[in-house]
Image (spheres, helix red, strand yellow):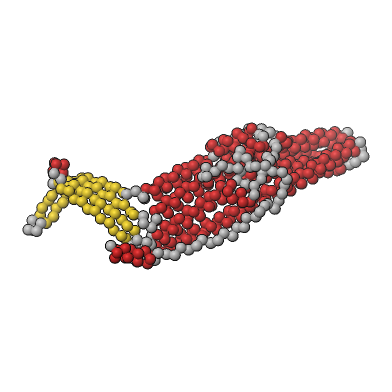
């Protein structure tokens, strides 16, 4: 007994591999964000409802129910649940049964050929004693993989909700641009008619009439271009919500959409909120457990096995008076020489573990950058909108004055033309910035994890 224990200890010592430590993380979590944008509030789970648009709420709900990426993610969860059951089943003994006749022909000791039929029923069972904990580690890796897949599903849901919200806000921005283009077209239609009338009556030159027609054609061409872009945006949104391409129901206009309240979250809280960071953490847990299990493959394993067989020369004898054969045994299997294959496999899993640690650092740094970009975007877009509103008001007043001066004969048509162009550009720029400000709020919620209540937690 002592000799057996000493031999086992020697085998364990000779096969053990010193674990390779994981690389240290290089992420330094800042105490606060570099951009401060005023009063904030807690992160809301259904943050898209803060825009106060029932049509947007319905689109996001439809997308979360029908999006094909989310349906695929749900199927992956079922897959990883089955993988976990496979890993858990390795702890249980295996049992096999067999039954049937066996026909054989053999030469006996006297040299005669004998044919026999043997009926038998057998059962075999085997069990691996997990003395090194390898099976436990593989189960831990499977649990981490499942948790990671749940976090991945949450990350996909957050991405889908954000993409739908951004797409809808872009659509409302395009609608507003189309309204400006149509209003400009109506104004230039009026200018064209007036220029034609003045040309016909001899008060204008043909040059001014042609310039007016050129501006009218430019405005008329902008309308179908925007309508085409709107149709493409509607089709993209339809795809996101799992529907056939088609029109999208509208709710609030661009001016009626209110940005959600700014959210508060320290950088350290971000590490617990974002599902993609949680998924990266679970990858580290999984690869670390897989690496430990790979090292355990170099250690001896203990196998217990037993079998029971009932035999009879006829089916009746098999039932009434069978011959009973049985075996019971155990074995210790230790790797002796496999061309360094097992050590190389352990090195492979160690390298994969190190890669997940490095990938985790990248995910966290990317998350910090996305939050900072969104915060600075909100701050700077507010300033741009203030300037754009002032420019729009000035351009409107300049156009009014230019039109009055032109009608009263105190200015040329070129003055009015320049004022029209400036006013149109100012109106479109303001609309684009207003839509961008709403969209960057979506980016902020996406970057902060959207207040998502993870199913993996």
Tell me the residue at 76%/44% (across/down): 385
Q: Is residue 428 left or right of residue 143?
A: right
Judge whether residue 214 can be spotted in this image.
no
- Which quadrant would residue 240 be assigned to in this image? top right
In the rendered view, does 312 fall on the left or right side of 189?
left
Residue 56 visible to the viewer: yes
* Residue appearing at x 54%, y 49% in the figure: 278
Residue 109 percent location from the top left of the image? 9, 58
418 shown above or below 361 = above
User: Total label count?
Assistant: 0
- The single residue placed furthest to the front in the displayed view is 2
Identify which residue, 439 or 444, lies in the foreground.
444
**In front of the other: 300 or 239:** 300
Instruction: Give percent across and percent down for residue 325.
Output: 18, 50
Quarter holding the N terminus is bottom left
**351 on left or right of 113:** right
| Residue in the image at 55% along x and 55% along y | 360
């Amino acid at each position: 007994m002592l000799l057996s224990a000493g031999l086992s200890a020697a085998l364990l010592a000779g096969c053990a591999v010193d674990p390779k430590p994981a690389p240290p993380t290089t992420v330094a979590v800042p105490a606060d964000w570099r951009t401060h944008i005023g009063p904030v509030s807690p992160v809301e789970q259904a943050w898209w409802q803060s825009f106060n648009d029932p049509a947007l709420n319905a689109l996001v709900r439809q997308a979360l129910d029908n999006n094909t990426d989310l349906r695929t993610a749900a199927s992956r969860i079922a897959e990883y649940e089955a993988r976990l059951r496979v890993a858990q089943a390795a702890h249980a003994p295996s049992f096999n049964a067999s039954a049937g006749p066996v026909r054989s022909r053999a030469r006996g000791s006297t040299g005669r050929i004998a044919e026999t039929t043997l009926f038998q029923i057998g059962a075999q069972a085997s069990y691996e004693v997990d003395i090194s904990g390898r099976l436990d580690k593989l189960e831990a890796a499977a649990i981490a993989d499942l948790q990671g897949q749940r976090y991945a599903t949450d990350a996909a849901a957050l991405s889908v909700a954000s993409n739908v919200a951004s797409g809808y806000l872009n659509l409302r921005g395009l609608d507003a641009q189309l309204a400006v283009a149509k209003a400009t077209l109506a104004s230039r239609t009026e200018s064209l008619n007036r220029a034609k009338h003045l040309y016909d009556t001899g008060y204008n030159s043909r040059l001014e009439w042609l310039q007016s027609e050129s501006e009218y054609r430019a405005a008329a061409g902008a309308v179908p271009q925007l309508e085409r872009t709107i149709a493409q945006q509607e089709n993209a949104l339809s795809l996101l919500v799992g529907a056939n391409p088609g029109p999208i129901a509208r709710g609030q206009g661009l001016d009626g959409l209110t940005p959600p309240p700014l959210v508060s979250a320290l950088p350290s809280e971000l590490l617990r909120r974002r599902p993609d960071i949680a998924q990266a953490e679970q990858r580290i847990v999984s690869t670390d457990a897989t690496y430990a299990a790979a090292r355990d493959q170099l250690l001896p394993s203990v196998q217990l096995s037993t079998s029971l067989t009932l035999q009879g020369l006829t089916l009746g004898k098999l039932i009434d008076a069978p011959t009973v054969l049985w075996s019971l045994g155990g074995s210790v299997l230790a790797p002796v020489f496999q061309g360094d294959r097992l050590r190389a496999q352990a090195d492979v899993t160690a390298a994969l573990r190190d890669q997940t640690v490095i990938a985790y650092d990248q995910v966290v740094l990317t998350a910090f950058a996305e939050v900072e970009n969104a915060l600075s975007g909100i701050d700077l877009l507010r300033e741009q909108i203030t300037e754009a509103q002032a420019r729009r008001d000035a351009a409107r007043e300049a156009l009014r004055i230019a039109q009055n001066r032109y009608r009263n004969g105190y200015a040329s048509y070129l003055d009015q033309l320049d004022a029209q162009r400036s006013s149109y550009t100012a109106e479109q720029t303001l609309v684009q910035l207003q839509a961008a400000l709403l969209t960057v709020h979506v980016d902020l919620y996406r970057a902060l994890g959207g207040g998502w209540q993870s199913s993996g937690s």
